[in-house]
Image (cartoon, grey):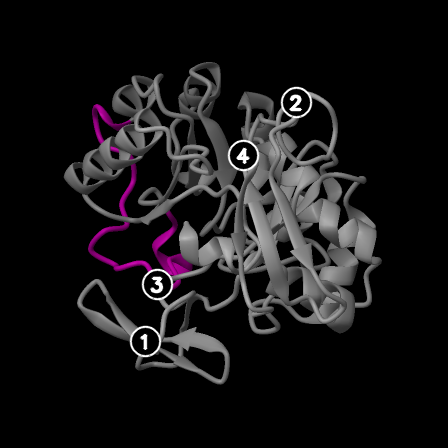
């Protein structure tokens, strides 16, 4: 969290990639303990996987990707003391599973999916709320098969998160998403991995070395494996790289994500009754100061 504060983030969802139930339980417990200890800025946990389409798994380990087993949905629905977001492939969920999760206040998003448009329509009817990493690791938009990309752009009810690092999505794709989604439904996500805020240029994921090269994180096969950016980097790219208005880019990094996280009445704007989370940056998007719940941290314009 400290590393991300220096890159313009005051609140985040720690994310666990596809893993065993035991590792998921440990991750949830860690977030539960952090919140109990009063660690401001931890909004909950994002379980990205493991219920994915194998052909769209991206950097997730093939051995960890699987359909839901007996008890998986029950366990997720039991997590009532920690805000949980799950990313899954709707086409691999049995009828009623997404509805059960949604009814249990689990935020359900689609990602790493080969879903058809009708499958997404059915998932939306059951409570699907958003799409994780728009354009990446999902069925593409074609003339007769809109896929998950087409559904994300056409279904106004769906939120869409997008990685604006200059590697995951072309600037034209970012502009297309912004013009397609209703105001407030497109949010920036860093998808940041372990190199952010540190001096190391590599780390290990599933036992495989992930290296930063030319601003992108990739494995030995050259496959993207997360990003190396902070939130202010995403704002800067949307303004300077994609040509979007500064005010809208800032809202995509603050007000809109707060609403998606169910904290729109506490975070994301400067107003009476809202938590004093602020980021002071200059014209080159270098962060100089942040305030988290009113507590200031100073930086050297990095």
Query: Dot 2 surroundings within 10 Å: few (below 14), some, or many (20 or more)?
Result: some
Q: Quadrant of residue 106?
A: top left
**Disc assigned to residue 293:** 4
Asked which secondary structure carries label 3, the reply is loop
Up/down of 227 relative to 67, above or below: below
Q: Is residue 34 left or right of residue 245?
A: left
Sooner in the amino-acid sequence: mark 1 or mark 3: 3
Asked which secondary structure carries label 4, the reply is loop
Sooner in the amino-acid sequence: mark 3 or mark 2: 3
Question: Residue 246: horizontal and vertical position, in percent?
Answer: 81, 57
Up/down of 260 relative to 55, above or below: above
Between tags 4 and 2, which lies in front?
4
Q: In this figure, which residue is indicated by the disc labeled 1?
A: 200
Q: In this figure, which residue is indicated by the disc labeled 2?
A: 265
Callouts 1 and 3 close, C-beta under 8 Å: yes
Question: Residue 244: horizontal and vertical position, in percent?
Answer: 81, 61
Label 3 to label 2: alpha-carbon separation: 31 Å
- Residue 195 shows up from this direction: yes
Label 3 to label 4: alpha-carbon separation: 25 Å
- Residue 145 shows up from this direction: no
Residue at horizontal 27%, vertical 45%?
66
Asked which secondary structure carries label 2, the reply is loop
Specify start and end residues of the magenta stretch as a single range.
52-72
Label 1 to label 2: alpha-carbon separation: 38 Å
Q: Quadrant of residue 213?
A: bottom left
Residue 134 or residue 16, whichever sits in front: 16
Callouts 4 and 1 close, C-beta under 8 Å: no
Residue at horizontal 50%, vertical 79%?
215
Q: Is residue 25 left or right of residue 214?
A: left
Q: Is residue 70 left or right of residue 183?
A: left
Q: In this figure, which residue is indicated by the disc labeled 3?
A: 194
Callouts 1 and 2 close, C-beta under 8 Å: no
């Amino acid at each position: 969290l400290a590393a991300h504060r220096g890159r313009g983030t005051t609140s985040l969802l720690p994310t666990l990639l596809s893993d065993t139930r035991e590792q998921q339980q440990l991750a949830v417990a860690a977030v539960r303990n952090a919140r109990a200890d009063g660690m401001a800025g931890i909004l909950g946990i994002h379980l990205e996987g493991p219920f994915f389409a194998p052909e769209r798994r991206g950097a997730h380990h093939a051995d960890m990707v699987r359909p839901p087993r007996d008890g998986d949905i029950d366990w997720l629905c039991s997590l009532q003391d920690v805000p949980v977001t799950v990313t899954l492939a709707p086409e691999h969920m049995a009828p009623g599973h997404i509805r059960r999760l949604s009814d249990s206040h689990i935020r359900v998003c689609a990602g790493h999916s080969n879903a058809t448009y009708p499958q997404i329509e059915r998932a939306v009817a059951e409570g699907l709320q958003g799409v994780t990493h728009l354009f990446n690791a999902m069925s593409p938009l074609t003339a007769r098969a809109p896929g998950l990309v087409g559904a994300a752009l056409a279904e106004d009810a769906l939120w869409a998160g997008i990685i604006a690092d200059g590697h995951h999505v072309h600037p034209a794709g970012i502009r297309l998403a912004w013009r397609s989604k209703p105001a407030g439904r497109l949010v920036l996500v860093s998808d940041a991995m372990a190199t952010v805020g540190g001096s190391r240029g590599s780390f290990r994921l599933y036992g495989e070395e992930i290296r930063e090269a030319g601003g992108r994180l990739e494995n030995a096969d050259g496959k993207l494996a997360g990003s190396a950016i902070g939130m202010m980097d995403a704002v800067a790219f949307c303004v300077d790289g994609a040509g979007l208005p500064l005010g809208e880019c800032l809202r995509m990094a603050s007000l809109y994500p707060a609403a998606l996280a169910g904290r729109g009445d506490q975070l994301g704007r400067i107003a009476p009754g809202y938590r004093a989370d602020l980021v002071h940056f200059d014209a080159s998007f270098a962060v100089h100061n942040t305030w988290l719940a009113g507590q200031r941290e100073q930086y050297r314009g990095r």
